[in-house]
Amino acid sequence: MDANTPPTCCPVLELRQYTLHPGKRDQLVELFEREFIESQEALGIWLVGQFRDLDHPDRFVWLRGFTEMATRAQALQEFYGGPVCKAHRETAKETMIDSDNVLLLRPARPRSGFSLGHLARQSRGATENPPGLLLATICHLKEGESGEKIAESYEEMMRSELSEKGASLLACFVTENQINTFPALPVREDANVFVWFSIFADETRDAAQDATVVRSVVWPDKIGDGLRDRLKAEPEILRLRPTPRSRLHG
């Protein structure tokens, strides 16, 4: 590894999508960013980013990472059994309809994770949203298809195509197939996905505000024509605005 190349995060990643009761998202964001960031990171968990889904006003999305599956189990046990979670769990649950839409992922290739050099967080109490619009493109693969092989064939093409449209490829992940080491929190065990994360550094760009244009950026014909027959359905594309204390932003 080049000593000048920043390390990547994370060997194990959770992509968590929560469906909330109408009008409760800001309440959860405020609680989460006040109580649930430092308390998890003190246990060795990476809080990669928190986001408001622009296309679903009652959806909260966040990314959480771990060094490995074994340490994930220990850290989650300590967090959910610890005093901070116990003190605020019921308040958080009151905002939620569903919290089980979770993909357990790992980097598609050794250097395909998030670069820690891009990850900085505002201090506790911050209220201003940082710049950037994160785009998560989730491809549900047909049985037998390999996300690793797709990354090997298409990652550099994706990087080039995104760059031409003013966006940047950040990371590529595939399904982590190891058994869920913390079954108290369900994950989508039937998933076989290839997920890539990209970003518009300036969220005020007209392109970043238009869902149709965003789709053409992250799913151009050059990519779609090669992958469409390998997918169960059209890709799921999330347009995600970083919350004030999201480490991942533009």
Image (cartoon, rainbow, N blue to C red):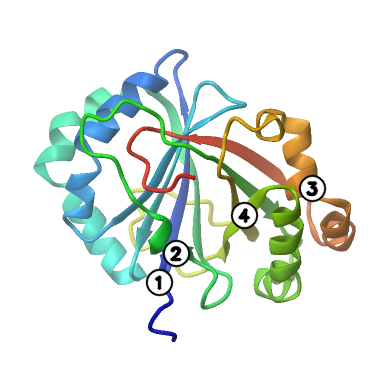
Callout 2: SS? strand
Q: Earlier in the sequence, mark 2 or mark 3?
A: 2
Kindly check if marks 4 and 3 are in contact, taking CB atoms under 8 A apart as contact. no
Residue assigned mark 3: 233
Could you tell me how far apart the alpha carbons at marks 1 and 3 are, in whole angstroms? Answer: 35 Å
Q: Which residue is mark 4?
A: 168
Amino acid on which disc 4 is placed? Ser
Amino acid tagged 1: Pro
Q: Are marks 1 and 3 in contact (CB under 8 Å)?
A: no
Q: Is residue 71 left or right of residue 65?
A: left
For disc 1, the marked residue is 6
Amino acid type at circle 2 is Ser
Quadrant hosting residue 151: bottom right
Q: What's under tag 3, amino acid-wise? A: Ala
Q: Which residue is mark 2?
A: 115
Question: Residue 93, how many percent across, how many down?
Answer: 31, 27
